[in-house]
Amino acid sequence: MKTTTLAFILLILTLAILIGLPEWLMAQAPPPPPDKPDQAPIGGLVLLATAGGAYAVKKLRDRKL
């Protein structure tokens, strides 16, 4: 009786390991590389810098007169 129970427990353990083994050994692929980041819109920045430069030129011309 003891050998039958031991054999049954050994069979159950072996089946559990064989069923779970592929899940344990499953390798995951590395994540894909990130996409190129979106470029910042510099159109507004150029417009602000141009307006600031024009304002500075106007102030300098007003001071000299």
Image (spheres, rainbow, N blue to C red):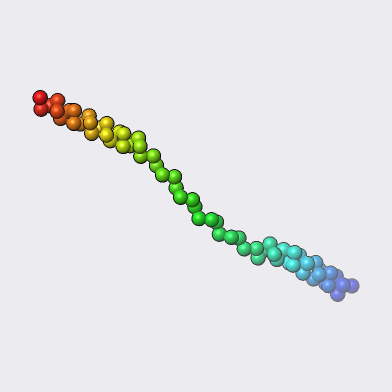
User: Residue at 12% across / 26% down in the picture?
Assistant: 63
User: Residue at 55% across / 56% down in the picture?
Assistant: 31
Is residue 39 among what the camera can see?
A: yes
Say above or below: 57 vs 10: above
User: Residue at 87% across / 72% down in the picture?
Assistant: 4
Question: Which residue lies most toward the right here?
Answer: 1
- Disc tally is 0
Q: Is residue 54 left or right of residue 2?
A: left
User: Residue at 72% across / 63% down in the picture?
Assistant: 20
User: Where the N terminus falls, by quadrant?
Assistant: bottom right
Question: Residue 65 at what x, y percent from top left?
Answer: 10, 24
Is residue 13 among what the camera can see?
A: no
Q: Is residue 20 left or right of residue 43?
A: right
7 or 17, nearer to the observer: 17
Question: Residue 9 at what x, y percent from top left?
Answer: 81, 68
Question: Residue 56 at what x, y percent from top left?
Answer: 20, 31
Q: Quadrant of residue 57?
A: top left
Say above or below: 14 vs 28: below
Question: Residue 28 at what x, y percent from top left?
Answer: 60, 60
49 or 4, nearer to the observer: 49
Q: Quadrant of residue 48?
A: top left
Question: Which residue lies most toward the bottom here?
Answer: 3
Q: Quadrant of residue 14?
A: bottom right
Q: Is residue 47 left or right of residue 14?
A: left
